[in-house]
Structures are given as C-alpha cells and as structure tokens.
Image (cartoon, rainbow, N blue to C red):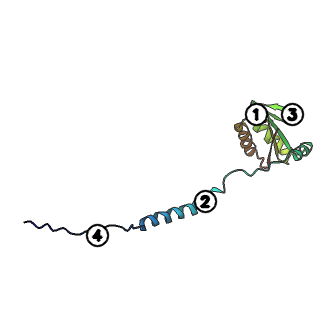
C-alpha cells in the first residue's frame, strides 16, 4: 500500500498591485510634465463678426486679402499670383500697420487660408483676422 503524500498548497488569492501602481505614477508624472508644453503651440486669432469686418474694411490701415473658391488671392481688390503674395504683403505691411483681414470664400480650401497665414507671418504681419464670406 502506497500512501501518497500530498502537500496542501495555499491558493493564490491576492494580487500584488505595487508594479501597477508604479506604472501609473510614472505615467502621471509624464503627463504632468508634457501637458504645459501643449498649450504653447498654435496661432492666436481674433475672428470678427460680419458687422466688425465691414467697419474694418473701410479703414485704410488694414491689408485686405480675398481668397476665392479655387485658391486665388486678391490683395485690396487686385488679383495677385501665389508667388507674389509674400512680397506684396511685405510691401503693404510697411504702409498699413493695422494688420491683415482675410476674407475667405465659403468654398475656399483650408490649405489656401493656412498658406496665406504662413506667408503673412513670414512677411512680418502678426495681427491676423479671418472672416468667411
């Protein structure tokens, strides 16, 4: 007769959450360091209402650029090619220091508007307003 000796094992019913807590604390610290850096990007834009835009157009110290449906630019009612926009903005910004008013057609592409904003910033125009027509 063989007597089998069985060892009674304790069942494992506890979970060690220390490594999990360590991971969460590291992720929390990373988020706390990265979050303030996310607010420093982007452009500050002031979007005028339709009434304000009409009043500003009458003033002569603001550069007005219209963007058409197909991405064509016209500065102060004069059609300008895309290559000449940056030079025209730099020349006009010396005379008109009130900033830039972009009047975009409702069917104009987002890329055309962003391109114009980039060209304006490189030409030295930092006050930009945008209105959709």
- Residue 92, position as x, y percentages in the image: 83, 41
Q: Earlier in the sequence, mark 2 or mark 1?
A: 2
- The quadrant where residue 133 appears: top right
Measure the C-alpha gap from mark 3 to mark 2: 44 Å
- Residue 111, position as x, y percentages in the image: 69, 37
Quadrant for the N terminus in the image: bottom left
Of the residues tagged 2 and 4, which is closer to the observer?
4
- Residue 54, position as x, y percentages in the image: 90, 43
Q: Residue at x 37, y 68 (%)?
A: 14
Residue behind mark 3: 77
Q: Could you tell whether 3 is left or right of 78 in the image?
A: left
Q: Residues within 10 Å of mark 3 (few under 14, many from 20)?
A: few
Measure the C-alpha gap from mark 1 to mark 3: 19 Å
Label ID, residue 35:
2
Residue behind mark 4: 10
Mark 3, secondary structure of its residue: loop
Residue behind mark 1: 107
Measure the C-alpha gap from mark 2 to mark 4: 46 Å
- Seen from the viewer's position, the closer of residues 124 and 20 is 20
């Amino acid at each position: 007769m063989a007597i089998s000796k069985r060892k009674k094992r304790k069942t494992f019913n506890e979970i060690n959450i220390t490594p999990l807590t360590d991971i969460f604390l590291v992720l929390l610290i990373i988020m706390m360091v990265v979050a303030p850096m996310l607010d420093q990007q982007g452009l500050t834009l002031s979007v005028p209402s339709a009434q304000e835009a009409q009043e500003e157009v009458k003033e002569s110290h603001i550069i007005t650029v219209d963007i058409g449906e197909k991405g064509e630019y016209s500065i102060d009612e004069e059609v300008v090619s895309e290559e000449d926009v940056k030079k025209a903005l730099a020349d006009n910004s010396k005379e008109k220091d009130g900033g830039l008013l972009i009047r975009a057609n409702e069917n104009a592409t987002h890329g055309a508007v962003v391109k114009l904003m980039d060209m304006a910033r490189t030409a030295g125009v930092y006050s930009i307003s945008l209105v959709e027509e």
